[in-house]
Amino acid sequence: MLVACKRYLEVRWLAPRSVDGFASVEQRAALLRQLGHWRPGTMGRAVASQTLFANASVLDTERGVLVPGQAVLVDGERIAGVGVGLDSAAEARVIDVHGMTLMPGLIDCHVHVTAASAHLAQIAEWSPTYLAAHAQQIARAMLQRGFTTVRDAGGCDFGFAQAIAEGLFEGPRVIFGGRALSQTGGHGDDRGRGRTAHEPGYSYTALSTICDGVPEVRKAVREEIKRGAAHIKLMLSGGVAARAINRGLQCGVRTIEHGNLMDASTPPLFLEHQAFYVPTLVTYSALSEHGREFGLPEDSYRKVFDVLDAGLRALEMAYRAGVPIAYGTDLLGGMHVQQLHEFAIRAQVQPAADILRSATLGSTTSAC
Ligand SMILES: [Zn+2]
């Protein structure tokens, strides 16, 4: 499957397993040869020329249909048109993608590109350059899975996003929020029990910062905005309990992440405040299977089971109520490989077309 996004055309394929109409190995190899110089990192700076992808089946995620016999015209970095009989320049390069599917690039609204280990407190002790080396591998793998935009929910900074934008690192476009805000003793307070100091320096690689009360929160928010954060991540009581979710919605939080323990009082508040829901079910299933193996501390491991089943019930409740839902995964360490498994988990509740819409259009409106 080819994956295109609006900002620039990233041509990638997802593993063709078990889905008819995906590119065969031979087709993908032939396409690679045709794409020639289009290497990750150079595409965004390609000379302004036109490429016409002909004979494509285009997955229209808005309508939830696969439309055969389509052409997709790319002008420089932009998709200029999708349809039949498109006008292209005489010198436009034409690539025949007969038998393959083109679709919008996937968007993951909840990632941590710097979460190279599930033991987050350990990451805070790493060198920033060492962490960047790990993070660029994580980001590249996301792109290769078909994700062309990701929203980082804690840890990624302006330097990493800039390195990707300039083609120094391979990866999807990263919309970052800097460090997540946590209260002392809260979800983002990774200090050991005997530790009182919290390193304030920017080269410190923690995913979160600690702030209590209005003046400290205000300052922390301003610091992140100064560094270019596109959003602010608040860790409200761990982010899964109904009371915290409802209060967040009432106070104007625009997207709720995880939300596993929401109850019937929550979906109406989403609708009233025009907020988005970003479930991250795969992280709980991955943590239950592999958490120990990838460094999750024992006390965190035990909590996973409390929220695992509740997550599916929360998704069902939100989906039936018509809450806008975006795609998110929240995977850590070696569990990033399960980024596409969220599709399979949500399929227990939602039709495939709705999940794909969440991972493209739904995520566009919530993340960007
Ligand atoms: Zn997260």
Image (cartoon, grey):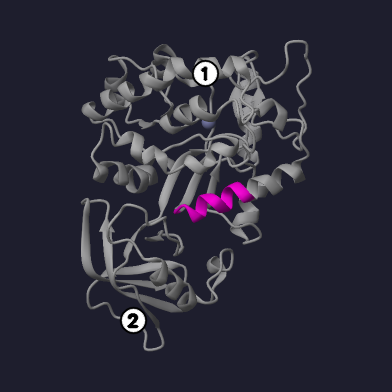
Q: Residue 164: x percent and y percent? A: 61, 55
Is residue 254 visible to the viewer in this orientation of the structure?
no
Disc 2: which residue? 88
- Expressed as whole percent of the image width and height from the top left, the position of residue 294 reads 61, 31
Image quarter in which the N terminus is found? bottom left
Residue 194 is left or right of residue 189, and the answer is: right
Residue that appears at 42% across and 44% down: 340
Q: Residues within 10 Å of mark 1 (few under 14, many from 20)?
A: some
Which residue is found at the position 63% from the left and 61% from the top? Answer: 166
**Amino acid at pointer 2:** Ser
Mark 2 and mark 1 in contact? Answer it, CB < 8 Å: no
Q: Tell me the residue at 54%/30% (across/down).
A: 290
Task: Write the residue at 28% across / 32% down.
Answer: 348
Whole-number angstrom distance, CA of label 2 to CA of label 1:
52 Å
The image quadrant that residue 297 belongs to is top right
Quadrant of the drawing holding the C terminus? top left
Q: Is residue 224 above or below residue 17?
A: above
- Residue at label 1? 238
For residue 15, what is the image quadrant? bottom left
Q: How many marks?
A: 2
Tag of residue 290: none
Image height of 270 relative to 242, above or below:
below
Label 2 vs 1, first from the N-terminus: 2
* SS majority, magenta: helix
Q: Element type at marker 1?
A: helix
For the record, the magenta segment spans: 137-146
The amino acid beneath tag 1 is Gly
Mark 2 nearby-residue class (10 Å; few <14, some 14–19, many ≥20): some
